[in-house]
Image (cartoon, coloured by chain):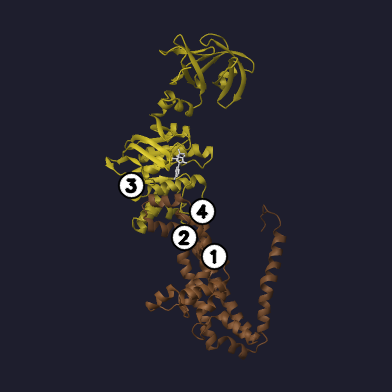
Chain colours: A yellow, B brown
């Protein structure tokens, strides 16, 4: 299935949850709606499923307008954050439910449910009740249940939101493999950027009911279209810089030249990973002093004070940090290898 | 029982519970049985199995069952409306539900009798050939009235706690409203509905005040068992009264036990069946 969303809008009383959202999802694509909580992601998903009806806009599936057709006829599989399993039914009955209500024969639907249980790696649990499964298992059952009626589109609403970090990671790569295998068009909602970046062919970053950027995961990270995206996806140093002689300055750091009036206020974002730190001046020539070191595992996070009022965060691989002998109070030299500059409308 | 409970004091609380139940329930009831034993067997049989008494049992159990069943269906409906739909005056209606609890039962009886005999409802129904006052139908009406809150109040919180996403999941899987209600919502509500039904039934069995006015109290026709007991007491036939009371006690207990099993069965039959 391919989907085309045009100018979708949804208000809850006087609050606009979804504000003029348009995008497309192609056949077999894995697309993620990423954004902070309350940004309207789930509402978009629920509008596509038909669980909410839009105030305006069009939802097209395979070129056909489905905006006003009922949920039951939309052929979408929906997976909820809190599993939403039928707790008085066995796992098998849960999965077979979508077939049962369509009048599929018992033997056929149970065979199909068992097949799906196998697909999600839970063979043999068919007689269990939902309460006898772990959170991760429940969500896999929910997925199998959603797949049973053979939907053309899979909608996942924060599917791993209720699970712990390790399990999230595990299920994430599991889901990726599953998608590669069944190639079902999928739309995922998450506030977890790692999840979005790892799983998706395309990411839509949402904020306050709008789409801020629509791009491949790498592009979201490397070329944020708006300041919001730069700040929301990945860690960043955000500084307010000013323009002098056509060059952007923040304290001793210079961020290239732009054709903007002198005195303009601009916001600069640069990732801690994009700060190069050396113990000798050379390529990196802006001097600073290490004020704190935070061990993060594979990397160390350094706070480097360039001068009064100008402190930045840099991430260096733990090996490099040890080799260079970085320690508190050591004088180092930094350069920013990549930055993103956003111009505010007003000037100082 | 080996598990350490978070809240200490299982021993003392259980002890108190048993003591409390003994004083309040078991002791008076044993006195009832004891009193009955002053009768010889033939006299006992005469007291509890005369045609007039049998008719009263039939009426009491039949009308109570009918009233509780009506309350089961409409209680579910009222709870549904109160939980699911916002509408003006909802808070007020929610309060009205408790009124049958608060009202002295005699007041309810007089009000119902007035409404259904000389009142507009009574006259309208009468013109349609339906007599409510002074018939078994009137008794069912009174018992339905006093039993209304039970099912509503047991089902309401369960319905409130029911996650919307479970229903939405069913709809997304292609279930229509009816299939969703039958397969997904009702099984969750049923245990609560059954216990509401049991309470409404128990309450109806023992009800006296609101029924005597509307019943007309014709022996063999509209005479309920509690009234029969009162009548015996007024004739200083204490042993006869307690004999009937004892029969009522044991049969109510049996019925409640049955309903309890039924609700337990409704709750677990699927899971036990599937777990095999
Ligand atoms: N049924 C509703 N009634 C009123 N407000 C709602 C409803 N559903 C969502 N909202 C509001 O819309 C906004 C967006 O919600 P949602 O789409 O769930 O965001 P997200 O999924 O990004 O966290 C939130 O502020 C939320 O409070």
Marks 2 and 3 sit apart, C-alpha to C-alpha, by 27 Å
Q: Is B58 rendered above or below residue B102?
A: below
Q: Position of residue B104 (x, y in %)?
A: 58, 70
Mark 1 highlights which residue?
B99
In the foreground, A93 or B264: B264
- Give the mark toward the camera: 3 or 1: 1
Q: Judge the density around disc 4: few (<14), some (14-19), many (≥20) Cα neighbours within 10 Å.
A: few
Give me the chain letter of mark 1.
Answer: B
Q: Check the image and name the residue furthest to the left.
A: A63
Answer yes or no: is residue B245 visible: yes
* Residue at image mark 2: B187
Along the viewing direction, whichever of A49 and A56 lies nearer the viewer: A56
Helix, strand, or loop for circle 2?
helix
Alpha-carbon span between mark 2 and mark 4: 14 Å
Image point 53% across, 37% down: which residue?
A165
Ranked by sequence position, the earlier of labels 2 and 1 is: 1
Q: Residues within 10 Å of mark 2 (few under 14, many from 20)?
A: some
- Which chain does tag 3 point to? A
Crowd rating for badge 3 (residues with CA inside 10 Å; few <14, some 14–19, many 20+): many
Observer-side mark, 2 or 4, equals: 4
Q: Which mark is residue A74?
A: 3
In the rendered image, residue A342, in percent from the top left (x then y), is placed at 44, 21
Q: Is mark 4 within 8 Å of ligand 1?
A: no
Q: Do labels 2 and 1 share a chain?
A: yes
Discs 2 and 4 lie in a common subunit: yes
Q: Do the residues labelled 4 and 3 touch (CB within 8 Å)?
A: no
Mark in the foreground, 4 or 1: 1
In the displayed structure, A190 sits above or below B251; it is above
SS class of the residue under badge 4? helix
Other residues around mark 1 within 10 Å, as few (<14) / some (14–19) / many (≥20): some
């Amino acid at each position: 299935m391919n989907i085309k969303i045009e100018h979708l809008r949804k208000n809850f009383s006087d609050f606009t949850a979804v504000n003029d959202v348009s995008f497309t999802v192609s056949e077999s694509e894995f697309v993620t709606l990423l954004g902070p909580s309350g940004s309207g992601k789930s509402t978009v998903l629920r509008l596509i499923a038909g669980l909410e009806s839009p105030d305006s806009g069009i939802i097209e599936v395979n070129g056909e307008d489905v905006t006003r057709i009922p949920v039951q006829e939309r052929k979408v599989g929906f997976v909820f954050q809190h599993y939403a399993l039928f707790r008085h039914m066995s796992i098998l009955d849960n999965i077979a439910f979508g077939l049962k209500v369509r009048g599929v024969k018992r033997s056929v639907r149970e065979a199909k449910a068992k097949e799906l249980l196998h697909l999600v790696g839970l063979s043999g649990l068919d007689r269990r009740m939902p309460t006898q499964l772990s959170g991760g298992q429940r969500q896999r059952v929910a997925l199998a249940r959603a797949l049973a009626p053979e939907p053309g589109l899979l909608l996942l609403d924060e599917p791993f939101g209720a699970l712990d970090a390790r399990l999230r990671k595990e299920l994430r790569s599991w889901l990726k493999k599953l998608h590669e295998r069944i190639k079902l068009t999928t739309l995922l909602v998450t506030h977890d950027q790692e999840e979005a970046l790892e799983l998706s062919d395309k990411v839509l970053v949402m904020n306050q009911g709008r789409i801020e950027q629509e791009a491949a995961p790498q592009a979201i990270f490397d070329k944020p279209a708006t300041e919001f995206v730069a700040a929301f996806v990945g860690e960043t140093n955000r500084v307010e810089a000013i323009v002098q002689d056509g060059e952007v300055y923040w304290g001793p750091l210079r961020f290239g030249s732009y054709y903007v009036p002198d005195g303009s206020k601009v916001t600069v974002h640069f990732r801690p990973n994009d700060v190069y730190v050396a113990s000798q001046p050379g390529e990196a020539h802006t001097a600073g002093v290490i004020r704190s070191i935070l061990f993060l595992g594979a990397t160390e996070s350094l706070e480097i004070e360039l001068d009064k009022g100008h402190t930045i965060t840099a991430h260096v691989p733990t090996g490099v940090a040890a080799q260079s002998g970085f320690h508190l109070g050591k004088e180092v030299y930094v350069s920013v290898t990549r930055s993103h500059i956003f111009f505010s409308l007003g000037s100082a | 029982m080996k598990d350490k409970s978070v809240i200490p004091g299982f021993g003392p609380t259980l002890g108190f519970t048993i003591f409390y139940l003994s004083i309040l329930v078991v002791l008076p009831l044993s006195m009832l049985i004891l009193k009955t034993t002053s009768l010889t067997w033939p006299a006992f049989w005469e007291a509890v199995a005369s045609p007039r008494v049998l008719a009263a049992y039939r009426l009491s159990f039949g009308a109570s069952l009918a009233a509780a069943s009506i309350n089961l269906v409409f209680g579910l409906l009222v709870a549904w409306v109160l939980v699911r739909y916002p509408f003006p005056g909802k808070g007020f209606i929610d309060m009205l539900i408790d009124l049958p609890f608060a009202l002295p039962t005699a007041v309810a009886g007089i009000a119902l009798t007035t409404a259904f005999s000389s009142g507009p409802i009574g006259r309208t129904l009468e013109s349609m050939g339906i007599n409510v006052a002074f018939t078994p139908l009137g008794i069912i009406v009174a018992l339905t009235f006093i039993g209304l809150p039970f099912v509503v109040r047991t089902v309401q919180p369960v319905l409130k706690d029911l996650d919307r996403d479970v229903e939405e999941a069913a709809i997304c899987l292609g279930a229509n409203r009816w299939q969703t209600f039958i397969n997904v919502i009702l099984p969750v509500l049923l245990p609560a509905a059954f216990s509401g039904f049991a309470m409404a039934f128990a309450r109806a069995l023992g009800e006296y005040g609101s029924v005597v006015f509307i019943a007309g109290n014709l022996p063999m026709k509209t005479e309920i068992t509690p009234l029969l007991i009162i009548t015996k007491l007024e004739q200083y036939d204490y042993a006869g009264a307690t004999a009937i009371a004892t029969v009522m006690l044991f049969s109510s207990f049996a019925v409640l036990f049955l309903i309890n099993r039924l609700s337990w069965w409704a709750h677990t039959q699927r899971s036990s069946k599937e777990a095999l």
